[in-house]
Image: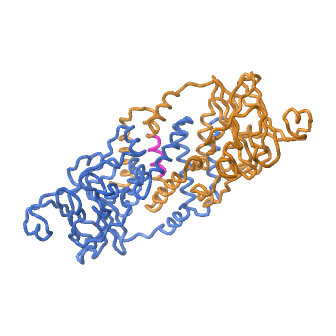
Chain colours: A blue, B orange
């Protein structure tokens, strides 16, 4: 038997082995995975040593994960897979605010905070106020949406990365917008920072001469009953690396200028010294979409 | 920007990010991986929940690995990837004995044993003698090749899977063929057995209604100076599951009858009672191939 027919019949045998999968969505995913994975292997023709290096890399990636580190999400991020999944899911809601990646640091619950509260009480840096409105695609305010935000400190670390230096919850806040859909909170102007490089993903970036940096941003998850939950960032306009985010997550529409507000009344209203830096973002949610949901949930159950 | 152009420009950006990779082989592999991985994602359009389920599955697979368990090799095996890599690498040496997968249980050094020694002194079952010759592709015996063999016991477990029940080294032996290329050792006739199912790969097989069994076999790694090392199995002819190996590793040429030898002189020569079961396999090695080796080793270094 020739190699070509040998590898093709092998791919067919693997596809055939999934024929009796009861969940049709799982069968579809595994069939597509098998075809594309085999096509990759057939294209690069790895040596046994290269295959072993791949097994070792994936194993080390899994073993780097713990309750505060998710190295597989980092790998998905630096290969552009996370952003691809986000872009595909975002395509259904073109009138809403663009989504971007979740990232690996949404690992602990954000502390509930009142509007105007400082999310970064333990962080040094330039005080800023972030504010805006939660709107529906028709432009109407959505009252009392839930707004989960998290960011790194000025050294580029999230709370979970600095036990003993930051308390869990520093840089995080869970807010409820007011009856007019408005929200506002204090923080420090975020800085660009490197993703963690002390693991297999860092080794991969080093081996490929890629920098590990993400431009300055604050994460948002916004949810309201009857609307599709939105996971996104606000990027600080003019930040270093805004053109070369290590995880490919920048969308033009999410870059916002962080400008100086010199109005002393505004400073007094937000409880900060004048002048202060202000970041403004209105977030538009799309009505909930129900298509496919039951099938996807079943798949998740079974694969887990 | 339309979704299609959005996902295509994302794939281009990821490919471009690898442009400065100094190792050209690593660049080639990552470029191919990016294209095929993105094509898979674009085809199945996973929901966020499905992407999370995939991340969780890969993480659990890495975390199931330890010094005696390699769940990523099992995953590679049940997706036919291990066998695909073997088949591609075997294609260069069509006149040699067929290779097959390494499997996840070559984790400890086999004890050095003298020709004729019993590799399974702690195992119950039908005594057998396995013997044959190590030959070059020209049919000449290769003297003093190294022959590493390992197998499960009659309950289907390797030594490393049964601490306290089997000593490490039971079911294993490292032999040196004699000056005529001949080898022979005693053991028990192996049984079919399930691959370990108490991890994510077992969950995957259960969710897809696939059985986890491998037909009865003994593993071999045969090495001699100047020849390409061979990793293979001898499969017991007529074993259950010979047509549906869970890891797709059966090649017709590797199935050998294990037949009853009634010659009392042969029994006496091998130190067993007459009659006894005999498995015969001549193993043909191909002269060493040097193409690409240095590049591949460099890739391995860097990725690790």
Report the magenta residues as a range.
B31-40
Q: Return the residue nearer the eye: A123 or A257.
A: A123
- In which quarter of the view is residue A159 placed? bottom left
Residue B34, picture quadrant: top left
Direction from residue A137 to residue B18 in the image, left or right: right
In depth, the one of B171 and B167 nearer the eye is B167
Instruction: Please indicate whether residue A304 sits to the left or right of residue A210 in the image.
Output: right
Indicate left or right for B92 with B46 as reference.
right
Residue A66 position in % (x across, y down): 44, 56
Q: Is residue B189 left or right of residue B266?
A: left
Is residue B36 magenta-colored?
A: yes
Give x and y (percent) for residue B119.
74, 40
Viewer can see residue A253: no
Q: Which x, y percent locates residue B58?
A: 50, 53
User: Magenta-highlighted stretch: main secondary structure?
Assistant: helix
In the image, farthest residue toward the bottom: A179
**Residue B175 visible here:** yes
Q: At x 77% / y 23%, what residue is drawn? A: B180
> How many labels, in total?
0
The residue at 54%/53% (across/down) is B64
B208 relative to A60, above or below: below
């Amino acid at each position: 038997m020739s190699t070509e027919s040998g590898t093709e019949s092998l791919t067919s045998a693997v596809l055939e082995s999934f024929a009796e999968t009861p969940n049709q969505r799982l069968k579809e995913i595994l069939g597509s995975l098998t075809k594309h994975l085999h096509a990759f292997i057939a294209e690069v023709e790895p040596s046994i040593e290269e295959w072993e290096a791949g097994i070792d890399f994936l194993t080390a990636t899994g073993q780097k994960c713990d309750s505060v580190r998710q190295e597989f999400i980092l790998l998905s991020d630096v290969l552009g897979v996370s952003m691809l999944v986000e872009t595909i899911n975002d395509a259904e809601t073109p009138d809403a605010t663009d989504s971007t990646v979740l990232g690996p640091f949404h690992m602990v619950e954000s502390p509930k905070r009142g509007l105007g509260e400082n999310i970064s009480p333990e962080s040094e840096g330039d005080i800023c106020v972030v504010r805006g409105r939660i709107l529906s695609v028709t432009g109407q305010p959505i009252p009392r949406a839930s707004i989960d935000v998290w960011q790194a400190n000025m050294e580029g670390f999230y709370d979970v990365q600095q036990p003993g230096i930051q308390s869990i919850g520093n840089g995080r806040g869970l807010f409820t917008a007011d009856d007019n859909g408005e929200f506002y909170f204090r923080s420090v102007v975020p800085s660009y920072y490197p993703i963690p490089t002390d693991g297999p993903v860092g080794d991969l970036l080093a081996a490929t001469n890629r920098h590990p940096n993400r431009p300055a941003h604050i994460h948002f998850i916004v949810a309201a009953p009857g609307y599709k939950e939105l996971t996104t960032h606000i990027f600080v306009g003019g930040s270093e690396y805004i053109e070369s985010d290590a995880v490919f997550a920048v969308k033009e529409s999410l870059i916002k200028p962080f400008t100086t507000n010199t109005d002393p009344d505004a400073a007094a209203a937000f409880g900060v010294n004048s002048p202060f830096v202000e970041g403004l973002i209105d977030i538009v949610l799309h009505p909930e979409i129900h298509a496919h949901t039951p099938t996807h949930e079943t798949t998740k159950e079974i694969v887990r």
